[in-house]
Amino acid sequence: MSNLIILPIIFPFIIGAVLIFFSKSSRAQRIISGISALLMVGISAYLAVLAFQQDTVILESGDWVAPYGIILVLDNLAALMVLITSILAASCLFFAFGTISKKREKYYFYPFYFFLIVGVNGAFLTGDIFNLFVFFEVMLLASYVLIVNGGSKYQLRESFKYVILNIFGSALFIMAIAWIYSVTGTVNMAHLSERVAEINQPGIVTVIAVMFFIVFGAKGALFPLYFWLPKSYYGPPAALAALFGGLLTKVGIYAIIRMFTLVFYHEPLFTHKGIIVTAAGFTMLLGVLGAVSQFDFKRILSYHIISQVGYMVMGLGIFTPLAVAGAIYYIVHHMFVKTALFLLAGATEKITGTTDIKAMGGLIKSQPVLTWSFFIAAISLAGIPPLSGFFSKFPIILAGFQEGQWVISAVALLVGLLTLISMMKIFGYVFWGENKLTERQNNMSVTNLLIPIAPLVAFSIILGFAAEPIFTYSLHIAEQILEPSNYVNAVLKE
Amino acid sequence: MEIVMSAVIGLIFAVAIYLMLSRNIIRVLIGTLMLSHSVHLILLTMSGLQRGAPPLLFLEAGAYSDPLPQALILTAIVINFGVTAFVSVLVYRTYKEHKTADLYDLRGAKDE
């Protein structure tokens, strides 16, 4: 029991509320939000250490004991996700300082940025499925505002579709909660886990499990519900596209991992090895094919989000400690690398004024640092050793072969190859080739934009070279979440 | 009673889907409203329609209704209120910028 767990939720909430009062002054907003984002990294790092020492820390709000009250649960997985969220939020925020337009700043960009963090951290920390819905809504409402902030024609058109799809997803979410409540009589996750185990997951519960999978799959951009992603992530400015690309889909994936390891784990042959693995395969393959067919920097990266979400879910679907550890490692790697790539695309856009890769060329001469940062992040994404992409794909695919899941493992290998092709395409068009830039563009300096990206690229290298301790940590988390009694006992104190 | 409610919910749900599939952007907005009404009713119905006692627990209370679904619905209604307000503004702004309320014209550029 520790009251500190609520800090990742309440702290950005207060800062967001304070920032509303400073909406006229861009300087005050930048100072406050910058300092708070760095403080958030400190807080979440402390919580990660706390979770590592005590395994599962819980907070019963108002001293109402579980399963009656609202509880927050910080286990290693949640702590890790909160930590990465804070790091990404800080990087994207500092990148936004250099790229965001005055108009967007004035119309509450920073307050909603922090409200988004509230929702994301809340979704990671909550131990109650209805609160998960509430925090999803907090996150989604902030994301609606941010995605349409700026109000260009393109944004309005595409955000309408994004909003409607998510409203429909939320309606299905409430339905699924109503059904699970009707069957088990509880909404507390630990209590759900216990009760579903008692009745040994009959058919009706499996149906509800699939319903939850559909809901979270729509938020996490899984096949066949990913079509909204590339277009809606294209509209907002680079700093936001990077944060969304790195963070939002992963909240859906986190919820899938949580529900299908804690509650619905009794029928793995049908749910995990059947539905989840199939969805993962199609997600990977169709996502990467979309990326190969595109010639727009941001769109290629958006399609790659889809294909990589597939890897994470595949790790869960194979459902051995090794595979789940690989999936967790992959989430960590993906969040850093994908955000870095989106931010690098933003820096490139700042120089060239376009995201069409055919209109660019020869950036390597004028921007060597940008080029090599992109190179590291890109080959890391494609999975070339010794960078983090290789060490996170390796355990997933290895576990796939060990479990005899030949088809999905072959698909995963093929997708890795196609990822490399589309990354080489970007590299060839944008950085190599004839120099198509004007004199002014050639002399442009983007050092202030590269500084917030540098830690992310550095993390990608560190995650690769320090694969041993990080994989051990992932395996520790995987073993913890694959043994639901840890979570249940910590929450219900039995 | 639950059977009747289920039929009603199904009807509202059908209306919602019908409206959301139409081309007019305002109809889609009303469709999302109907959709949220139907899911709130599901929340109420699935926990069993109880009658005869308030959802308050006195010390000497013999019977009481389950308060949780009501609390959940209240929360869901509040959230839905915020979302609807936002979508209304979004619809208005989209109409102002694009000068059309027809989703067919809002499909996007031809090369996409």
Image: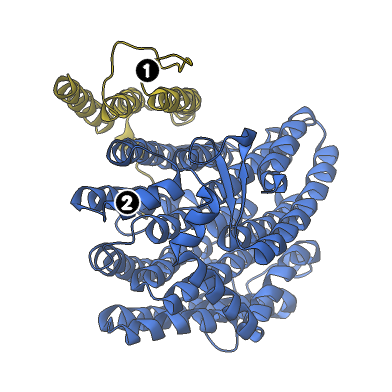
Q: Which of the pair A141/A294 is nearer the observer?
A: A141
Q: Mark 1 points at which residue?
A: B64
Q: Which of the pair A286/A188 is nearer the observer?
A: A188
The chain displayed yellow equals: B
- The amino acid type found where label 2 is placed reads Val
Estimate the x, y position of residue B55 in percent, counting from the top left.
41, 17
Label 2 element class? helix
Colour of chain A in the rendered structure image: blue
Q: Quadrant of residue A428?
A: bottom right
The chain to which mark 2 is attached is: A
Res B25 visible: no
Q: Which residue lies furthest to the bottom in this view?
A: A385
Estimate the x, y position of residue A338 in percent, counting from the top left.
56, 66
Report whether B103 appears left or right of A125: left
Residue at horizontal 56 percent and vertical 89 percent from the top = A385
Q: Quadrant of residue B73?
A: top left
Report whether A351 appears left or right of B70: right
Q: Which of the pair B97/A374 is nearer the observer?
A: A374
Estimate the x, y position of residue A38 in percent, counting from the top left.
79, 54
Res B79 visible: yes
- The amino acid type found where label 1 is placed reads Tyr
Q: In which quarter of the image is residue B77?
A: top left
- Which label is found at residue A196? 2
Within-10-Å neighbours for mark 2: few <14, some 14–19, many 20+: many
